[in-house]
Amino acid sequence: MIFTSDNWAGAHPAVAASLSAHSTGFAAAYGASDLDRKVEATFNEIFGQDVAVFFVGTGTAANSLALSAINRPGGVSFCHREAHVIADECGAPEFFSHGSRLVPVDGAEGKIDPANLEREIARFPAGFVHAGQPMAITLTQATEAGTVYTAEEIRAISKIAKAHGLPLHMDGARFANALVALDLTPAQMTVELGVDIVSFGGTKNGCWCAEALVFLDPAMAAQAPFIRKRAAQLFSKSRFISAQFDAYFENGLWLDVARHANAMAARLQVGIQSSSQTRLAWQSPANETFPIVPKSLARELSTKGALFYEWAPPRSAAHLVGEDETMLRLVTSFATTEDHVDQFVELLR
């Protein structure tokens, strides 16, 4: 009953097999192999247009280099208050963008509120050098609260971005989970809604170590090759990242495993709602679930073999958790089984 993180899961067997298949012989280095080119072409296909793709090793690298590529002197990027880029990356986005700042924006259930976003942008009037200048908006899809931005919500944020001349970046560490939850295509969730750059994650969804920085307008990527090299993210044997993505995309595997993870989370949520001791903080359509339980029950679950993190509630939801209660974060993955879920739910009863 391991619900700590989808990062705890191993590699999907198809991904592992592809890594093994490409582990012998010789191939051009630094992204120049036939396999690298094949996977880049696949990215073009799934986004429905030519894109610029740069493989990196971590989601932190993808997010940091995305903002670095669009940096401005005194630059300010706007994100949700609990977004991964501001809460969980140890200042890496600011470090790699040489001192740009992240400004938090409030919003319920992990999503930027457009009215709050407008108010925060207004704090940086054009030409006021002391404040700095807006440079980007970054949203997390799926969010750190397990929720997803709908197409309409992304479009509303994109409209604000375009009105202020700001690139819109999507942190897609759980891109596939959000995509299948919304039943959209990659282009429908990004290109058609005005997203400019995507941090495309595979690691949380069955890959071993595969992340990509995707510029939906290749013209925006002019400096990206140099930025990636300078950040020590240009892998010499990049075919091993490509081998993962090759298996990941084949026959829609990436969507199938995301659907499975989401389905296991939905099963968890039904079980939590059936228990008199627990309740959901909110509904989560992706693969993260946030129940509120008595502290004594959390301890009991741990002693009986369930692994999870006790989670600090978002500031906007702190009032939901009582003094003798705690919030848990339960994360499902391609490796989660119905038995894992059912065993956990049985303990709640």
Image (spheres, rainbow, N blue to C red):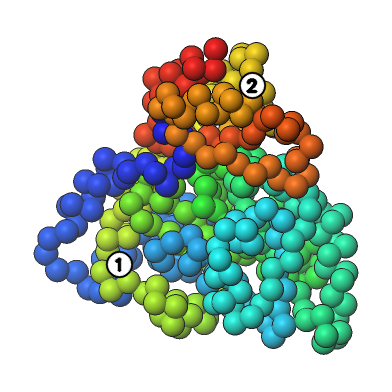
Query: Disc 1 residue type?
Result: Ser
Query: Left or right: where does residue 305 sit relative to residue 140?
Result: left
Q: Position of residue 74 (x, y in %)?
A: 72, 83
Instruction: Compare residues 215 and 338 and report the one nearer the observer.
Output: 338
Q: Position of residue 183 (x, y in %)?
A: 58, 36
Residue under pointer 2: 278
**Extreme residue in the left direction:** 25
Residue visible at 55% across and 53% down in the picture: 172
Query: Disc 2 residue type?
Result: Thr
> Residue 215, which numbered label?
none
Upstream in sequence: badge 1 or badge 2 = 1
- Residue 161: tell me if it is visible: yes
Name the quadrant of the C terminus: top right
Residue visible at 67% across and 30% down in the picture: 325
Residue under pointer 1: 238
Query: Left or right: where does residue 264 sit relative to residue 220?
Result: left
